[in-house]
Amino acid sequence: MATKSDLTYAAAARDLVAPFVAADLFAGSVLVAKAGEILLRDGFGLADREWNVPNGPTGKFRIGSLTKQFTATAILQLMERGKLALEDPVARHCPEAPDHWRAVTLLHLLTHSSGIPSYTSLPAFFRDMAQQDRSPREIIALTERAPLDFEPGTQFKYNNGAFIILGLIVERLSGLSYEDYLRQNILLPLGLASTGYEHLADIVPERVRGYRYRRGGMENAPYLAMSLPYAAGSIYSTVDDLLAWQRALTAARPISPSSVELMFADHGHGYGFGWGIQNQFARRQFVHAGGINGFSTVLSHYPDEDLTIILLANIQASPVQKIARDLAALHFGVAEHEPDVVLDAALLADYVGTYRLGPERILRVTQEGARLFIEGEDLSRQELAAKDDHSFLCRMLDFEVRFEADGVEQASRLLIRRNGKEAGAERIASLSPLAERGLG
């Protein structure tokens, strides 16, 4: 039974979300639970804008990169069955792998430290390639001839392509399709009846429609061939199933306690296996965000307090991590002025790159796990503190940076605001290291 304090929290939480809904920044489902007990479970805004159908808590949303948690679990299950070791080179399970991948291991793939370029970072991928179905092997072929971005294990660079390779390995070692493997080994055993691999032709009860903001209003999200996100992002789910998923991991039901420990360990750069391993409000936080055509998602868990916050939005680039942070702050009684928003590394990866601010000035944005930095010829390397999912503050030099991004593709532009003035910088192709610093 809900207590008076629970009811008070639910009312305050709805009031917190309401301005985001009114501003058309959020529509979707929200769930907050303490030790598995529901504090808030509600729908906001519209699930279908053409039919004026409201969102409810049972709506099915694309969850994007939260899919990576399921893929990582499949890999750990196969490890427990003696089918693989995390230290295995990729070539052991993909003998067609190119020679320059010989040092890449499964652990590197799981932790975004392989150096293999990601297919979703290819120029104009979402414009020119996202409508065409491809097999996992065909997706991998898009980047397998490209040189590594760095030596395996030396850096972190968020990589959807790495999880395509992991999905293919699941298929090869199990003899099942990725979809069938998840259904038989994870979804059915855990009772996740409202979670599945999305096929656009299927009739899916309560499937929510996705939207994005363009040209002063909302429009339907662009078509995406759902074979492309595959093991990196093709699952749909509900807030209820995702809470059940998080509780199952806590109870070590789909995998052993030792595998759960591996999943939630920081393997470098604030990342485990499909989870960001971070701190928010001086509390441990396990979190991952997802962005896919028409949808933005976040699953945030504070293990020491056993607080879980789930937001599934059917608006692309919705500030779900900011809202989730504010809902946690409300529960913990944290004053508004206290900590910054701590963002998942998956979102920050969209902002990393080189930007041209005028004819002669180059800015470079880099990432270290959940931390973002900016530098240039006349700007020493400065950390950017997140204000929300898209805006950052450089406290040392008192300027603000906002990235123009749609939650799916890499940011196309950034805006710098200082002393009431604003300047824009367009993303450009990567230059040589000297040129990126404005020296060449």
Image: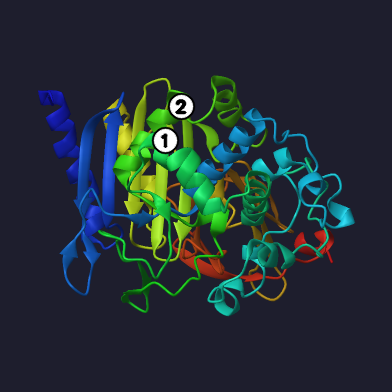
User: Which residue is labeled 2 in the image?
Assistant: 253
Tell me whether the residue at label 2 lies in contact with that at label 1, contact meaning CB atoms closer than 8 angstroms: yes
The answer to which image quadrant residue 118 occupies is: bottom right
| Camera-nearest label, 2 or 1 | 1
Residue 358 in the image: x percent, y percent? 65, 74
**Could you give the CA–CA distance between mark 2 and mark 1, rounded to whole angstroms?**
9 Å
Give the mark count. 2
| Element on which disc 2 rests | loop
Q: Is residue 210 above or below residue 158?
A: below
Task: Indicate the quadrant containing the C terminus: top left, top right, bottom left or bottom right.
Answer: bottom right
Observer-nearest of 38 and 172: 172
Q: Which mark is residue 189?
A: 1
Q: Residues within 10 Å of mark 2 (few under 14, many from 20)?
A: some
- Seen at 72% across and 68% down, the residue is 142
Looking at the picture, which amino acid does disc 1 mark?
Answer: Pro
Q: Which mark is residue 294?
A: none
- Seen at 22% across and 70% down, the residue is 49
Q: How is the image coloured?
A: rainbow
- Seen at 39% across and 65% down, the residue is 294
| Element on which disc 1 rests | helix
- Seen at 46% across and 29% down, the residue is 249
